[in-house]
Amino acid sequence: MGFGRLGAQGVPGEVALTATLDEIAQVTDPYKTPQARLSRNLLYLTRSPTGYALMRDCGIRLDKHKITGWLAGERVPATEQQARLEEAFRRLRRRNMRPSLTRRLNADGGTRVEIHPADQSDVDPQHQRTARWRHKNIYRWDPIVAAWSRSDLQDLNHQWRYVVTELGSDWRRYEHVTHLGFLA
């Protein structure tokens, strides 16, 4: 039986973990306009040789006139190019933020995470499982942040399962969640 078949809603824990870490590290900013995000991405990527290498790895042809035009606002990259720039930015930002984010989350003995279970409001009452929000102190963030910085969802899934199995016998109820809150 697959998740959501009876009407439960939520996302896999590793996806919620990625989104929350992205928010803390300012990888994503839903409040910026597309033009502001494009400008931020270009400025961040063009400040280092690593940024140029990541743009190349993401399939962006590095033409000096094109990049200069984008930076000056004289030209606008195609939608596909903007998506590739966003991916290159995400990779570089995660890579650069890994050390400081790990230190921040490990500081003072770890970080408390609030885990909000999947939303079962659309599930028939006879099939609902009792699940309340839980909190968990995570003391070792190194492997979690390392997997996040590599965008390795498989490893993040493994790390998330390790975190939730420590919740006891009802750990499977927290494989899919609606929200993660960090006290960081």
Image (spheres, rainbow, N blue to C red):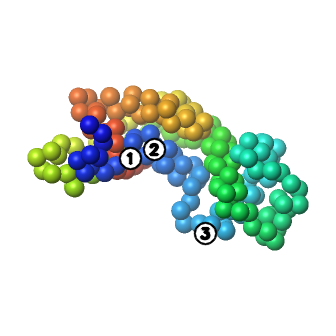
Circles 1 and 3 in contact, beta carbons < 8 Å: no
Q: Earlier in the sequence, mark 2 or mark 3?
A: 2
Residue 184, how many percent across, how many down? 47, 46
Q: Which residue is mark 3?
A: 33
Q: Which residue type does callout 1 highlight?
A: Val
Disc 3 secondary structure class: loop
Left or right position of 160 against 105: left
For label 3, count other residues whose C-alpha is less than 10 Å away and answer few (under 14), some (14-19) or many (20+): few
Q: Earlier in the sequence, mark 1 or mark 3?
A: 1
Per the rendering, the mark at residue 15 is 2
Q: Residue furthest left?
A: 126
Residue 92, how many percent across, how many down? 68, 45
Q: Residue at x 77, y 45 (%)?
A: 56
Residue 133, how many percent across, how many down? 27, 46
Left or right position of 7 against 61: left
Q: Residue at x 34, y 42 (%)?
A: 176
Per the rendering, the mark at residue 11 is 1
Vertical arrangement, residue 41 with respect to residue 4, above or below: below
- When asked about the image quadrant of residue 149, the answer is top right
- How far separated are the C-alphas under marks 2 and 3? 23 Å
Left or right position of 40 against 101: right
Disc 2 secondary structure class: helix
